[in-house]
Image: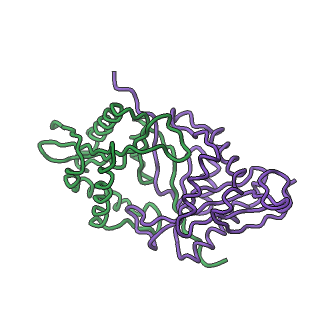
Chain colours: A purple, B green
Amino acid sequence: MNGEPVTVSYAGVEQLADIETVWWTLHAHHIETDYPRHGQLRAERQTWESRSPQFAELLQKPEAFLVLAVAEGGSEAGTVSGADEVVGYALVHFQSSAGNWRITGERYAELESLAVLPTYRGRGIGERIMQAVYARMRELDVQELSVRVVHANEGANRFYQRLGFQPWHATYAGPIPDPPG
Amino acid sequence: MREITITRAGAERADDVEDVCRSLFEAVADAGPAVPGIPVRDLDETWERRRANYLEWLAEPGAFLLIAEAEGRVVGYAMVRTEGPLDGWDSHGPLAELESLAVLPGLRGRGIGRLLVEAAEEQLRAAGISSLLIGTVAGNRAAIGFYQHLGYPLWANQYLGRIPDGPR
């Protein structure tokens, strides 16, 4: 079983490669969930080679950071050093302004991506990662954090609602219909 | 109903949509903050920021305004941008985003919004664009039914959280 102790720490772009395995499980979930009612708009079959440069660019923004949850003595892929294994991560960057809303400070945090390996879920690792995100935000005096979640991903919507996140914006999407006959 | 004309325009007409834009954000402000503790900016500041956004977006290739007029008066508008693919999402073709859609309060429920969306679709089809994203404030119940009916169901939710009180 996955009873190994899990430690949570901060990292930067130099450790981006360590999240590849966890990212794949998140991406596979997006692909599997599929959203047939959105017709053409569905999760793209990406590769780490196409996604990681986007993450790297975000991590090079000022004060952007990664949170890594590392299991000691993990035996699966995603090895950091020796037998340690990254089992969860969050990628956070900062945005200035917030459209029509007057946020508390000059900027807010954007949670670009957060995932935990399926075999490690239900152990509160996601919450611990979020506590680490909050701690860094406090140090930087940033009060608000935004995240975008696909509507059909019920687990993710519940996770953020349970943490007290409030609905802010909604995005509707679909294929443009053929012209009326 | 008075006859409605819809005209495609660019940055040169951004100032013509000010009254309708303000009426939209008045309604947003009246509805209260979408997120408790995060107030809406005041109307002058909102319009100033919106105007700057519109001018920036209308300088992008493919972006346009649609202006609905009745008897020479602007009664509604749509602001549309065409963008590259969303990170991580494959639209199987070019994507556009309806950034704003607004109709003067006294003239809502007469199909002007629908005319604007259909005119946008016509323009986008002609430009070879296959999918449309529409951003709204959360909790706008009227928008859910309106866009769903036009073939655009709710796709993604953006949440805002605040850090819990006190260090741990």
The total of numbered circles placed on residues is 0
Image coords of residue B117 (percent x, y)? 33, 38
Q: Residue furthest top?
A: A181
Q: Residue at x 31, y 47 (%)?
A: B79
Which quarter of the figure has residue A46? Answer: top right
Q: Quadrant of the C terminus of chain A?
A: top left
The image shows residue B61, relative to residue A180, as above or below, that is below
The image shows residue A55, relative to residue B7, as above or below, that is below
The image shows residue B45, relative to residue A21, as above or below, that is below
Q: Residue furthest left?
A: B71
Going by the image, does A29 lie left or right of A167? right
Q: Residue at x 59, y 57 (%)?
A: A56
| Between B115 and B120, the one nearer to me in the picture | B120
Q: Residue at x 33, y 31 (%)?
A: B126
Image coords of residue B151 (percent x, y)? 43, 34
Q: Residue at x 56, y 45 (%)?
A: B88
The image shows residue A49, relative to residue A140, as above or below, that is above
Going by the image, does A136 lie left or right of B81? right
Image coords of residue B51 (percent x, y)? 28, 58
Which quarter of the figure has residue B50? Answer: bottom left
Going by the image, does B15 lie left or right of A142? left
Image coords of residue B66 (percent x, y)? 26, 43
